[in-house]
Amino acid sequence: MPLRLTSAPVSGLKNRKSSAPRPRGSPFAGHARRKPNTQPGGVKKAAASHAADDDEQPLPDTGVSQYIPETASVEDVVQAIESIRDTMFEEVPQRAGMNSTRIAQVLTLRRSLPPLASVAHVHTLLNGPTRVEKEIFELVTSGRVKRLVVPGRGTDAAGLGDCLVLAEDLEQLVRQSDLNEHLQVDKFLQTISKDTSIPTGAFAPDEYLALVRAGFLVSGRGAPPTSVSLSLPNTGPYLRLLSAGRNHLVALLRKSSYNEAPLELLRDRWDGAVESERSFSVAKRARGEFAGILPGKTKKWRELYGISFRWAVEEALGAGVIEIFDTGSVGVGVRLL
């Protein structure tokens, strides 16, 4: 017969409650629980905004910088025009992120642009207004340089319509065109050798029409034209590209609270977050890590066809859109005017 052991109440004995004090409730027990590293959206945005305001302060200004004229390897107007002509674009990088069709488009547009240099850009490189204007006048008088004024583009410092071109560059353009089929090229070159204003009766009506269609003349109303001046083919696309580069530089400066930034920071913004050939970037690519986007994905190459950062800064500085100054701590600063 199995035995079952059960507890039985014992008379006179009662269960005693523990004498240890009960823990007190937390005063925050009623609040919603949240992870320690999270904050409400509004608080996080406000904190980030205050941090940005605290970190970004106006750059120290110790005076106007002569960085551009001091580092420009030019000594006269002719050298300045050549430098502006030859340094407008950067070389297409090996890892461009563009297919062969796009690269061909970039190179074709570059070759089609006229070898112009704005007067404001020349002034930036030489930094001597009186001397530069005197030299330009002498070069234009001698026929070594042609000064072109594009109607409707402005002729002041900020305008885009006051440009210079070397006479030998102009002659090369004329001889490479198909004008030989319509008129005598030597006759045209002789006509513009001293003055960019073309006399009304210098050419026959069909010759005027051929020159206008080729882009070498800008005519007024009337047939035959009553006011004709010298121009260059594709001057319109050139000026539009120049204006787009200037506007992009302005937009990059406006990203800063005080519309100013160190020159090197502005350069990084212009180039975009692209991969480079620096050792750390090469090492990241070797490990299969992200080292930056390809240049073809940036606005510099998508819309500006690889305009050089320094070229854009020089042009905007000459136009009075920006100014550069010494900071004394972070190098050269750039400020939007």
Image: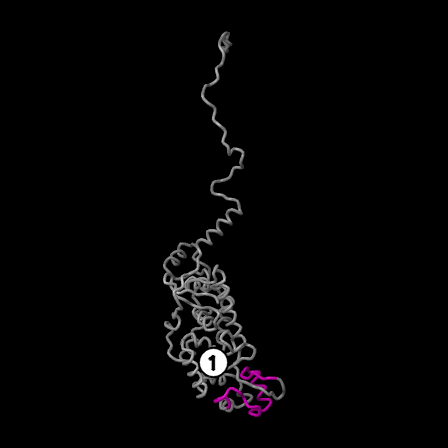
Q: Which residue is mark 1?
A: 164
**Badge 1, how many Cα within 10 Å: few under 14, some, many 20+?**
many
The image quarter in which residue 213 lies: bottom right
Q: Is residue 264 left or right of residue 246?
A: left
Image position, residue 31 (x, y; %): 53, 36
The range drawn in magenta is: 191-220
Residue at (52, 37) in percent of width and height: 33
User: In this rendering, is residue 54 above or below 253?
Assistant: above
Kindly identify the residue that appears in the image at 55 percent across and 90 percent down. Answer: 199
Residue 210 shown in magenta: yes
- Extreme residue toward the right, this view: 222
Q: Position of residue 239 (x, y in %)?
A: 52, 74
Above-or-below relation of 253 to 10: below
- Is the residue 127 above or below the residue 337 in the image? below
Looking at this view, name the residue that lies furthest to the front: 62
* Amino acid type for the residue under numbered disc 1: Leu
Residue 168 x %, y %: 44, 84
Q: Position of residue 122 (x, y in %)?
A: 44, 77
Q: Nearer the viewer, residue 23 or 240?
A: 23
* Display colour scheme: one colour
Is 129 within the magenta?
Answer: no
Q: Nearer the viewer, residue 245 or 182?
A: 245
